[in-house]
Image (spheres, coloured by chain):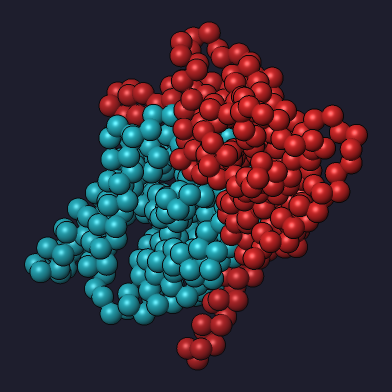
Chain colours: A cyan, B red
C-alpha cells in the first residue's frame, strides 16, 4: 500500500516504513539505544529528502525516549539538576546546530557533513564498544573481583561548582554544559538523540554513577530532540507528521519485541552485536564517500529561508 | 473503452466545425482538469484528446503531426558536481538554474525533430532543453552546459522528464489522443498542457490548457499547517510524539500486569 507523505512529497510503501520503524525499535529495545542513528540513514536510503529525514528522525526519538524516561523517573534514577544543566547546554547546541544545518544546506555540503559525522562517530563508538565488550567477555572468564576507585578528574578543578545530590557529585557546571551543547549540535545535524555520545561522556568525563546515567541522558534527550523538532518545523518546514507517526507505531511494537529478546541474551553478547551493527552502518556510509559515484552530478534544493 | 467517448465527442465537434476557420485549428479536451493528491495517491493517468478542425479537405504535401507537452510548475534548482578531495567525493562545483519544471513530458506522433524544425522549437520552446531557463553560470564554472544536461539526465532517470515518440494516436489526419502517466511523487501546482499541430516541421496551430494538481484532505491540511502555522505544527508533532511514547509504555505495562 502506497502512502503519499505530505511534507516529504514522495510516495512510499507504508509496510516498508513500518518495517524500518520496527527494525529500529527492535534494536533500541534490544540494546537500550535511541535508534536515531539508524533511522536517519535508513530514511535516506528509501529516498526521503535528507532535511525531512533528519527533522522527522528527531521527532521519532522524542517518542522512543519518553517511555524510557518515565520508567527511570519511577525508579528515581534521574538526576534532574544534572539533567537541567545538560539541557541548558543542549538547547544552545541545538539552536546552533539548526542554524549550521541551514547554512550547510545552502552551500550544498549538508550531505557530506551528515555522512562524515556518521562515519566518524559510528566508527569510534563501534570500535570502542567492540573492544570493551571483547575485554569484558575475556574478563568474565577470568577472576571476577576487581576494585574501582573514584578518580580525581581534571574537571573537578574548574570554577562554578555546583552540588548534584542524586549523582553525589560536587563539580563545575562547565563540563556538563559543554557535553550537553555538543549533543545538541549532533541532534540538530544528525537527527539523533546523542545518547551514544552522552552516556560515555557522563561516566568517564563527569564521573557520574552508572545507575543514574541512562535516565538522566534520556531526560536530556527528550527535551533537546523535542526542541530540535520544533526548530526544524519553524525554520525548514521539514517535519513530516505522517512519516513520524508510522515510524513511531512500528518502533513501539519493535521495541517491545526487542526487550523480550534482549532479556534472553547476555550483556556482552548484546554489546558485540550492537558494535557489529554500528560498524556495518559506518562501513556502508564510508564506502559511499570513497567509491567514485556513477553520477557525479546531483540536484540540490535550497532551504526554505535561504 | 475509456477512449471511445472522447473520440466520438471529438469527431462530433469536428463535423460541427464552422465554415469561417481559415486553417487547421485544434479542438481539445482532457479526461480531467484536476488531479487530487490524497494520502493513497500513487500516480494518475491523464488522457489528452482532440481533433484538427478544418473546413476544407486536408492540404496536399507533408502529413499532419501532433505534439503534446505537459509542463509542471518551475522552480530554481542547484545542480552540483562532485569531485575527489582528500580521497572522498564531495560537492565542489554548483550552478544555479533559474527555473526548471518539476515535471516535463513530451508525446508526439513521431521523433520530435522529424516533425518540428529547430527554429519552431526556439519560438515555441517545446523540447526539454528549451524548458529550462539558465541565465548565468558563475564564471569559475567552465562547462555550465554540462550542468543543465546533467539536470535533464537526472530527471529523465527519475521519470520526471520524458520524451516519447509515436505515442500520440492520429486517425485520418483529424482525431488524436494520447495519455500521460503522472508519477506518484508529484508536486502540486498548475500543469500546463500544450498541443501543437505541425506540417512539414512548421507549427500550424497550438492550444494550451491547464491541469490543476492539488493536495486534498489530510495532505492539504498537514501541508498548509506546516507552512502557515509552523510553530503550532511543530508543537503538534511534539505532542503527538510525547503522547505516542507515553501511551506505548502505558499499554505495554498494562499488558504485562
Q: Which of the two residues, B62 or A160, is positioned nearer the viewer here?
A: B62
Q: Quadrant of residue B4?
A: bottom right
Q: Which of the two residues, B195 or B132, is positioned nearer the viewer here?
A: B195
Q: Quadrant of residue A259?
A: bottom left
Q: Residue A183, can we see it? A: no
**Where does the N terminus of chain B fall, quadrant-wise?**
bottom right
Residue found at x 53% / y 8%:
B139
Residue found at x 54% / y 21%:
B95
How many marks on residues? 0
Which residue is outermost to the top? B139
> Residue B65 appears at what percent x and percent y?
63, 35
Which residue is outermost to the bottom? B257
Q: Quadrant of residue A214?
A: bottom left
> Residue B32 appears at what percent x and percent y?
75, 55
Residue found at x 16% / y 58%:
A135
A57 lies left or right of B222 = left
A207 lies left or right of A126 = right
Q: Which of the two residues, A287 or B220, is positioned nearer the viewer here?
A: B220
Q: Residue B152, can we see it? A: yes
> Residue B53 appears at what percent x and percent y?
79, 40
Where is A79 relative to B52, above or below?
below
Residue found at x 54% / y 88%:
B254
> Residue A75 appears at what percent x and percent y?
49, 75
Q: Which of the two residues, B126 or A216, is positioned nearer the viewer here?
A: B126
Where is A239 relative to B241, above or below?
above
Amino acid at each position: 500500500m502506497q502512502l503519499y507523505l505530505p511534507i516529504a512529497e514522495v510516495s512510499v510503501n507504508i509496510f516498508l516504513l513500518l518495517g524500518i520503524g520496527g527494525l529500529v525499535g527492535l534494536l533500541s529495545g534490544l540494546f537500550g539505544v535511541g535508534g536515531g542513528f539508524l533511522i536517519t540513514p535508513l530514511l535516506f536510503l528509501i529516498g526521503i529528502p535528507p532535511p525531512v529525514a533528519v527533522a522527522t528522525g528527531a521527532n521519532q526519538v522524542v517518542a522512543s525516549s519518553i517511555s524510557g524516561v518515565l520508567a527511570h523517573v519511577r525508579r528515581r534514577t534521574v538526576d534532574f539538576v544534572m539533567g537541567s544543566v545538560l539541557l541548558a547546554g543542549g538547547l544552545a547546541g541545538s539552536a546552533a546546530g539548526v542554524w549550521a544545518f541551514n547554512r550547510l544546506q545552502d552551500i550544498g555540503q549538508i550531505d557530506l557533513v551528515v555522512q562524515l559525522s556518521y562515519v566518524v562517530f559510528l566508527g569510534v563508538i563501534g570500535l570502542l564498544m567492540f573492544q570493551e565488550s571483547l575485554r569484558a567477555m575475556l574478563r568474565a572468564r577470568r577472576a571476577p573481583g576487581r576494585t574501582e576507585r573514584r578518580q580525581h578528574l581534571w574537571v573537578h578543578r574548574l570554577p562554578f561548582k555546583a552540588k548534584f545530590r542524586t549523582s553525589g557529585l560536587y563539580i563545575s557546571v562547565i563540563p556538563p554544559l559543554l557535553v550537553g551543547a555538543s549533543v545538541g549540535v549532533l541532534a540538530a545535524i544528525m537527527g539523533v538523540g546523542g545518547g551514544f555520545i552522552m552516556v560515555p561522556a557522563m561516566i568517564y568525563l563527569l564521573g557520574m554513577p552508572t545507575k543514574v546515567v541512562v535516565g538522566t541522558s534520556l531526560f536530556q534527550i527528550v527535551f533537546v530532540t523535542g526542541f530540535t523538532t520544533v526548530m526544524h518545523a519553524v525554520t525548514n518546514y521539514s517535519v513530516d507528521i505522517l512519516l513520524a507517526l508510522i515510524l513511531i507505531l512500528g518502533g513501539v511494537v519493535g521495541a517491545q519485541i526487542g526487550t523480550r529478546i534482549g532479556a534472553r541474551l547476555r550483556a556482552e553478547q548484546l554489546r558485540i552485536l550492537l558494535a557489529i551493527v554500528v560498524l556495518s552502518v559506518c562501513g556502508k556510509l564510508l564506502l559511499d564517500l570513497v567509491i567514485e559515484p556513477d553520477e557525479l552530478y546531483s540536484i540540490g534544493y535550497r532551504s526554505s529561508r535561504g | 473503452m475509456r477512449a471511445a467517448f472522447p473520440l466520438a465527442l471529438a469527431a462530433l465537434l469536428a463535423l460541427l466545425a464552422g465554415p469561417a476557420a481559415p486553417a487547421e485549428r485544434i479542438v481539445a479536451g482532457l479526461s480531467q482538469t484536476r488531479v487530487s493528491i490524497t494520502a493513497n495517491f500513487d500516480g494518475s493517468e491523464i488522457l489528452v484528446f482532440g481533433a484538427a478542425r478544418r473546413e476544407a479537405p486536408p492540404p496536399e504535401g507533408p502529413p499532419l503531426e501532433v505534439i503534446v507537452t505537459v509542463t509542471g510548475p518551475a522552480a530554481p534548482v542547484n545542480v552540483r558536481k562532485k569531485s575527489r578531495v582528500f580521497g572522498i567525493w564531495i560537492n565542489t562545483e554548483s550552478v544555479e538554474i533559474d527555473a526548471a519544471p518539476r515535471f516535463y513530458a513530451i508525446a508526439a506522433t513521431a521523433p520530435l525533430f522529424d516533425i518540428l524544425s529547430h527554429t519552431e522549437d526556439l519560438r515555441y520552446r517545446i523540447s526539454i532543453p528549451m524548458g529550462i531557463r539558465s541565465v548565468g553560470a558563475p564564471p569559475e564554472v567552465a562547462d555550465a552546459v554540462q550542468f543543465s544536461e546533467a539536470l535533464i539526465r537526472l530527471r529523465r532517470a527519475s521519470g520526471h522528464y520524458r520524451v516519447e515518440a509515436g505515442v500520440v494516436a492520429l486517425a485520418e489526419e483529424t482525431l488524436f489522443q494520447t495519455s500521460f502517466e503522472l508519477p506518484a511523487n508529484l508536486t502540486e501546482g498548475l500543469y500546463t498542457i500544450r498541443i501543437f499541430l505541425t506540417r512539414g516541421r512548421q507549427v500550424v496551430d497550438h492550444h494550451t490548457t491547464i491541469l490543476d494538481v492539488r493536495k486534498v484532505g489530510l495532505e492539504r491540511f498537514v501541508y498548509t499547517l506546516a507552512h502557515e502555522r509552523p510553530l503550532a505544527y511543530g508543537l503538534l508533532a511534539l505532542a503527538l510524539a510525547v503522547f505516542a511514547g507515553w501511551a506505548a509504555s502505558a499499554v505495554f505495562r498494562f499488558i504485562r500486569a
